[in-house]
Amino acid sequence: MLIFWIKEAIKLIGRAKSSFFLSLVSTSVSVLLITASVMIIQLSDSLQNRLKESVSINIFLKDSVNDSELLKIRKLISGQVFVKSVLYINKNQAADNFVKETGEDFRKLLV
């Protein structure tokens, strides 16, 4: 029975070559477009996640903020769902980081 179906399929392809060719091409194009759209969706999802994780915010506090207020602020920020980590850098650490990154000591200009 299977051999009969294969023979009939070959006969039909031979009789209607142009319609077989067009249906094969249209099916191939549609499969390629579906594959491309799925790949684009996955790429955009990974790009979106990478972009979300790369956002950083710097918050500058007044000198008058004491340790208890600083702890409250850290807890408030850390408690947010969208916050991955909180890093506190005091003035001296920030000045040292600036000197390391730029090679210039701005403190000499302030004196």
Image: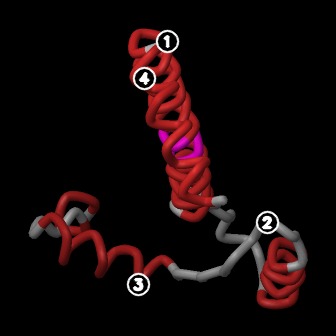
Q: CA distance from mark 1 to mark 3?
A: 74 Å
**In magenta segment, residue 77:** no
Give the residue drawn at x 65%, y 70%: 63
Task: Indicate the amino acid at tag 4.
Answer: Val
Give the residue number, with chain letter if any, for mark 3: 93
Q: Earlier in the sequence, mark 3 or mark 2?
A: 2
Query: 22 and 60: which one is in front?
Result: 22
Horizontal relation, residue 104 to residue 27: left or right? left
Q: Nearer the viewer, mark 2 or mark 1?
A: 1
Q: CA distance from mark 3 to mark 4?
A: 65 Å
In the picture shown, does residue 47 fall above or below 99? Answer: above
Q: Which residue is mark 4?
A: 25
The stretch of residues the image draws in magenta is: 35-40
Work out whether mark 2 precedes mark 1 in sequence or the reverse, and give the earlier one: 1
> Looking at the image, is mark 3 or mark 4 earlier in the sequence?
4
Residue 19 shows which numbered tag?
Answer: 1
Residue holding disc 2: 82
Please rate how many residues cluster around mark 2, counting C-alpha atoms within 10 Å: few if below 14, some from 14 to 19, many from 20. Answer: few
Pointers 3 and 2 in contact (C-beta within 8 Å): no
Please identify, in this view, whether the residue under mark 1 or under mark 3 is nearer the observer.
Answer: 1
- Label 4 Cα crowd, 10 Å radius (few <14 / some 14-19 / many 20+): few
The secondary structure type at the circle numbered 4 is helix
Of the pair 64 and 90, the residue shown nearer to us: 90
| Disc number placed over residue 30 in the picture, else none | none
Q: Position of residue 75 (x, y in %)?
A: 87, 83
In magenta segment, residue 37: yes
The reply to whether dot 4 and dot 2 touch (C-beta < 8 Å) is no
Mark 3 surroundings: few (<14), some (14-19) or many (≥20) residues within 10 A: few
- Secondary element at tag 1: helix
Locate residue 60: give its quadrant: bottom right
| Label 3 secondary element | helix
